[in-house]
Structure formats: C-alpha cells, structure tokens
Image (cartoon, rainbow, N blue to C red):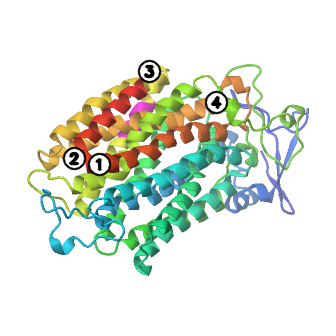
C-alpha cells in the first residue's frame, strides 16, 4: 500500500485481501479501489506518520500489528487513567471520617479525630460517605445507558477526549475542597454526579475501538490481559493518593487529575479508532457468509449496504441472545466488586490485624493487593473462557469460587499481616475475574453477535447497556455497605457479598 499526500488528504490504494479479513474498505466495485482519507479523520500523530510514508517498506500485516499494539497500549493506559480518577475518594474516607469511637479497637487518638465536616459525624459519617459513592455510581450507571448510543454516533477519539477532560475536572474539583475549605454536602454530591457522568464515556468507547481492531479469536485472553487496566489504574489510584491522604488529602485528587489530562493529550494525538482510517480492513468477527462488516469512515463514498447501517436501539440490544442473562449476572457481580473497590481501604484501616492497627498508607497499600489479584483473575478468567469456549461456564465457576474466599477473608483476615495480604490477593482473583470477562470479552462478543449481521454501529451501545445494568448494582453496593457496616457490623456485609455472588451464578 502506497500512501500519497495531496493537500490535507492521505490517499491509500487498496491492497489484496488478507485471509479471514474483510475487503470492505473498498469504495467501489473495482479491486483497485482508492480510499481518500481526510486529515480530520486521523489523529495528528498518526497523520504525520502516514505523510512521512513510514509504511512504504513494510508489509500490510506488519502495519496492522503495529497499529494493533498501539491501540492496545493507548486504550489500556487511557482507562487506567479513568480508574485512577475514581480511587482517591476510597483512600481519603478514613481521613474524612476517622474512627473516633473510644471503644473501637483501632480508634484514632483524640488528636487525630478531626475529620472533615460533614463526614466527621460519628453516627452518620459512613452513611454520608456511602451517599457520595451512590451519587457517583448512580450518575455513572444512568449515563452509561446513553453513553454507548452517543459513542456509536460520534468520533471515538473526540468522544474520549471530552469525557477524559470532564473526568479530570470533576476529580480536581474534589481536591480543591481541601484548599478552599468547602464543607457543603451539596457541593460534594454535585461534583460526584458530574464525575460519574463523564466517567461513563470511557468504557463503551474503548471496547468499540478494541472490537474494531480485533476479531473473536483468542478474544478472552486478549481482553483478559487488556482488562488489567482497571487494576493498574486502581493500584496507582490507591498507592499514590495514600501518600497525601493523611495530611494534605486534596493532593490525592489533584495528582490523579493531572495524570488524566496528560493521558487525554496522548489519546487525542495518537489513537486510531478504526483500521479503515489508515487503509486497513476490519477484522472478521464470524465466519458467516452473510456478514457485512462495513468500514465506518465518513469521508468516503458509501456503499449500498453500508448506507443501510444504523446504530441499534437499546431495546434491540437488550434482546441480543445472552444479553439479559449476562447483564443480570453483571448487576450482582459489580455490586460486590465496587463495594470492595470503594470500602476495602476503610475496612482495613479500622480493623485490627495481628494485634496491630494500620496507618492510612498501609491500608491503601494492602488494598492494592486486591487489584493485583484482580489482574491475575482477569487474565486467568479470559484464558479459561477461551479454553472452554464457553464464557458462561467460566464465569459461573469463578463466581462460586468467590464465595468461600469472601468468607475466609472475613474469618481469618485479621490473624496476621501476611495472611491478610494473601487473602486479599486471592479474593481479588476470584471477585474481579468474572466481572472482567463480562465487562470486556462478553461485551465485545455481544456487540459483534452474528444476529447483528456485521453492523459495526452496535458495539458501544451493547457495551453501554451491559455495563449500565451492572453499574446500577454498583450504585447500590457501596451505599448499602456503608449503612450496613455502621448499623449491623462487617459480618453482615460479608454475608451479603456471598449471597450476591450466589445469585449472580444462577
């Protein structure tokens, strides 16, 4: 393929079709069809590489692999930054609401009991923190239903850029409350609602981009490895904010916001959202002869088949085979995983472990072991689903294996520090594994289901729907955790987690 420059355009001459790939980047009936890609379609960085004719001495398959690697890395660190922006609130909870109960085993000394109004209320502080989680997660869940629809009708790169900048802004606004001495609950809730809405832009868009570049073969393993971006972001969003959480907690949010802004610039300059933008054919998702996986480029002549493609409705997506079953399982699984995500550092900080009480930094660092386990679980679950060639079976096995691990964490997690770290790690493997497969590989499978007949404008809608239903569960989980732990104790919380994972496996 020889790219040629002409004013602000990059012209690609069609190449012979690779095995098991579409030739739908062609724009007319001739095998010698020419694609004209306007500069506006390509990010500036990729456009510059094409203008410099960097592909002239490499094969088409090598070019494809280079772009695929770049897409994996860019979307990986993109969503890691999204997740990093979510975590500071979980780390600073023990600072906003210190355990000042004089009868508590890990009660703070009297000179460390100055929390942050209004969360320092000894009776309702945990409930108010749970309300913040609920505001964010409910906003995230509701927006997720529409985010996928909007993403399927937008340029993914611009869509991500706006969402990332909005997420960075909301995270920074929380950090500024420390420096501006803001104590109004309404302000915290409003910023959380804003942050949840912008955060919902991320996952539907990056799943769609990944599906644009990768077919179904080995998708479970690829998506399992790739999905560890959640845990990478959570680890960074736990350990780094923990450095500032005790004395200057506002920086916990501001550092995460700066990282998000930096990643936004990289995504805007280099992410190629569709292989057709650089003259490559999209992957085959199925072997059906009637599949018509059209290129979605807007600045080219449209074929008759492509002109008929429209983004599907949420109602149509809901009845894709398997959608309801996986969505309900995701509802319960995400309810538990997000409760751990947002409350585990607080739980560790306020419970004695091996006759010792942890500092804020230590509890954040140990909570990061849950995310390390989640990375192992994501990869293992993806590989298992590929080996069994049955995502539902792999998910069910992992869901039920989580139940005894949750019990053991509560029963023996306070014996000594090494055992606590080990149990937190293994619980992360079991809890995050099924959640990751449903969110990534299953979402991609359903978004390219054969019943859609190659419609490439369905992936974000399907991802938004399945993740939105799951996020409704996530919205209630942390809220219930805060209230239940305050009034009934942590035993009730852990028994609830076990019941929810049992329900998810059904």
Side of 492 relative to 27 (left or right):
left
Look at 59% across and 30% down and name the residue there.
445
Q: Please provide percent x and percent y for residue 363.
A: 25, 57
Cα distance in 3D space between marks 1 and 3: 26 Å
User: Tag 3's secondary structure?
Assistant: helix
According to the picture, the residue beneath numbered tag 1 turns out to be 369
Q: Please provide percent x and percent y for residue 220.
A: 50, 31
The answer to if 236 sits in the magenta stretch is no
| Circle 4 crowding by C-alpha within 10 Å: few under 14, some 14–19, many from 20 | some
Look at 20% across and 72% down and name the residue there.
112
The label shown at residue 175 is none
The label shown at residue 393 is 3
Number of numbered markers: 4
Cα distance in 3D space between marks 4 and 1: 36 Å
Tag 2–tag 1 contact (CB < 8 Å): yes
Mark found first going from the N terminus, 1 or 3:
1
According to the picture, the residue beneath numbered tag 2 turns out to be 421
Mark found first going from the N terminus, 2 or 3:
3
Mark found first going from the N terminus, 4 or 3:
4
Cα distance in 3D space between marks 4 and 2: 40 Å
Residue 312, by quadrant, is top right
Residue situated in front as seen by the camera: 75 or 363? 363
User: Tag 1's secondary structure?
Assistant: helix
The label shown at residue 318 is 4
Look at 78% across and 38% down and name the residue there.
15
Mark found first going from the N terminus, 4 or 2:
4
């Amino acid at each position: 393929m020889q790219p040629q420059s002409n004013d602000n355009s990059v012209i690609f001459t069609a190449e012979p079709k690779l095995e098991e790939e579409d030739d739908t980047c062609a724009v007319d009936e001739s095998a010698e069809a020419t694609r004209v890609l306007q500069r506006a379609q390509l990010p500036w960085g990729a456009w510059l590489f094409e203008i410099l004719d960097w592909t002239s001495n490499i094969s088409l398959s090598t070019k494809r692999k280079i772009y695929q690697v770049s897409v994996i890395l860019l979307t990986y660190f993109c969503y890691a930054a999204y997740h990093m922006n979510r975590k500071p609130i979980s780390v600073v909870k023990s600072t906003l609401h210190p355990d000042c109960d004089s009868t508590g085993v890990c009660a703070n000394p009297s000179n460390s009991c100055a929390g942050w109004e209004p969360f320092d209320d000894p009776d309702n502080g945990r409930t108010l923190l749970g309300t913040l989680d609920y505001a964010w997660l409910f906003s995230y869940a509701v927006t997720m239903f529409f985010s996928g629809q909007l993403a399927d009708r937008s340029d993914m790169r611009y869509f991500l850029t706006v969402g990332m900048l909005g997420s960075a802004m909301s995270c920074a606004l929380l950090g500024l409350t420390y420096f501006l001495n803001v104590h109004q609950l309404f302000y915290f809730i409003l910023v959380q609602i804003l942050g949840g809405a912008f955060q919902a832009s991320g996952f539907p868009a990056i799943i769609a981009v990944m599906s644009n570049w990768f077919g179904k073969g080995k998708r479970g393993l690829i998506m399992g490895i790739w999905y560890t971006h959640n845990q990478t972001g959570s680890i960074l969003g736990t350990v780094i904010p923990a450095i500032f959480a005790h004395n200057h907690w506002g920086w916990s949010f501001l550092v995460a916001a700066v990282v998000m802004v930096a990643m936004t610039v990289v995504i805007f300059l280099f992410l190629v959202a569709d292989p057709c933008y650089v003259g490559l054919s999209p992957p085959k998702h199925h072997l059906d002869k009637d599949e018509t996986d059209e290129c979605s480029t807007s600045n080219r002549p449209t074929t008759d088949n492509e002109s008929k493609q429209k983004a599907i409705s949420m109602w149509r997506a809901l009845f894709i085979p398997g959608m309801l079953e996986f969505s309900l399982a995701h509802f319960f699984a995400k309810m538990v995983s997000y409760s751990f995500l947002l409350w585990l550092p607080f739980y560790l900080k306020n419970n004695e472990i091996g006759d010792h009480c942890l500092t804020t930094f230590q509890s954040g660092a140990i909570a990061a072991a849950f995310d390390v386990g989640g990375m192992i679980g994501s990869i293992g679950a993806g590989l298992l689903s590929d080996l069994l060639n049955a995502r539902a079976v792999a998910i069910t096995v992992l869901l039920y294996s989580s139940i005894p691990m949750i019990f053991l964490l509560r029963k023996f997690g306070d014996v000594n520090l090494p055992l606590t770290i080990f149990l937190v790690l293994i619980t992360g493997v079991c809890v995050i594994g099924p959640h990751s497969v449903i969110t990534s590989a299953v979402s991609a499978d359903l978004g390219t289901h054969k019943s859609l007949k190659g419609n490439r404008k369905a992936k974000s809608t399907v991802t938004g729907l399945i993740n939105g239903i799951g996020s409704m569960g996530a919205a209630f989980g942390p809220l219930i955790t805060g209230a239940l732990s305050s009034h009934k104790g942590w035993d009730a919380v852990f028994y609830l987690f076990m019941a929810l994972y049992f329900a998810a496996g059904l």
